[in-house]
Image (tube, rainbow, N blue to C red):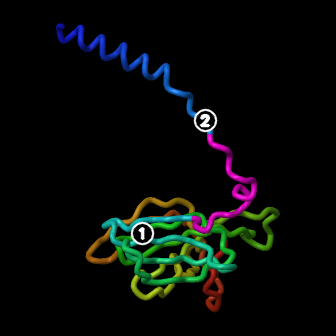
Amino acid sequence: MSIAGRMTAFLVGASLLAALAPMAVAAAPPPLAVYGSLPRTEAVALSGDGNMLAMVETDGDQRLLVIETADGHPAAKVGIGDLKLAGIEWAGSDYVIAYMHSTSRLSVYARHEQEFTQGIIVNAKDGSIKPLLRQSGDYLTAIFGHHGLMKIDGHWVGYYGVVPLERSMDGVSASGFF
């Protein structure tokens, strides 16, 4: 028998076996309680080199930003409470940036509340925290656009959009205004 004939016979035989095979029975759906339980882990980010893992998880009634090695050894844990998490991101393998949403008015004269994104930087080695943007009279400490991270001369630099403020004419006040 030729190769084409053997291939045709094989395909006909395979088709016949597939038609005779019993139909797969659909699995029963999980119990309703499974759908109502909240996930233990909210967000996960792997460091650029793949050696570290950052995740936001719930442990009992506490929400934590947990940083650990890829093989599961803990490096740092930071409580984040009820902050509205917008995401997490690595800067190399040394720092995790956690972005949070907050809602407030731009000024006492504003009629409506605004949604802002702010961030904290967590040192992956010791768990120390510092704000992503320092308080300043020159800009609002909220992020309005994220344009990347880059390591320059051994230091991580983030490129973010901010809203500039006018400096107060009062020599005592360090705050600015819109």
Q: Is residue 88 magenta?
A: no
Instruction: Quadrant for the C terminus, please.
Output: bottom right
x, y percent for residue 58: 62, 74
Up-down: is 78 above or below 1? Answer: below
- Asked whether residue 48 appears in the rendered view, the answer is yes
Which residue is at 40% across, 80% downward? 73
The extreme bottom residue here reads 172
Side (left or right) of 3 relative to 89: left
- Asked whether residue 163 appears in the rendered view, the answer is no
Instruction: Identify which residue, 19 or 58, lies in the foreground.
Output: 19
Q: Amino acid at mark 2?
A: Val
Pointers 1 and 2 in contact (CB under 8 A)?
Answer: no
Instruction: Identify which residue, 107 or 121, lies in the foreground.
Output: 121
Q: Secondary structure at mark 1?
A: strand
x, y percent for residue 125: 39, 85
Q: Which residues are magenta?
A: 27-42
Q: Amino acid at mark 1?
A: Trp
x, y percent for residue 51: 33, 71
Picture quarter containing residue 11? top left
Side (left or right) of 5 relative to 158: left
Q: Is residue 28 magenta?
A: yes
Measured in 3D between alpha carbons, the distance from the residue under mark 1 to the one under mark 2, in whole angstroms, is 44 Å
Residue carrying label 2? 25
Badge 2 crowding class, 10 Å Cα cut-off, few under 14, some 14 to 19, many 20 or more, is few
Residue carrying label 1? 90
x, y percent for residue 142: 59, 70
Picture quarter containing residue 52? bottom left
Instruction: Quadrant for the N terminus, please.
Output: top left
Q: Secondary structure at mark 2?
A: loop
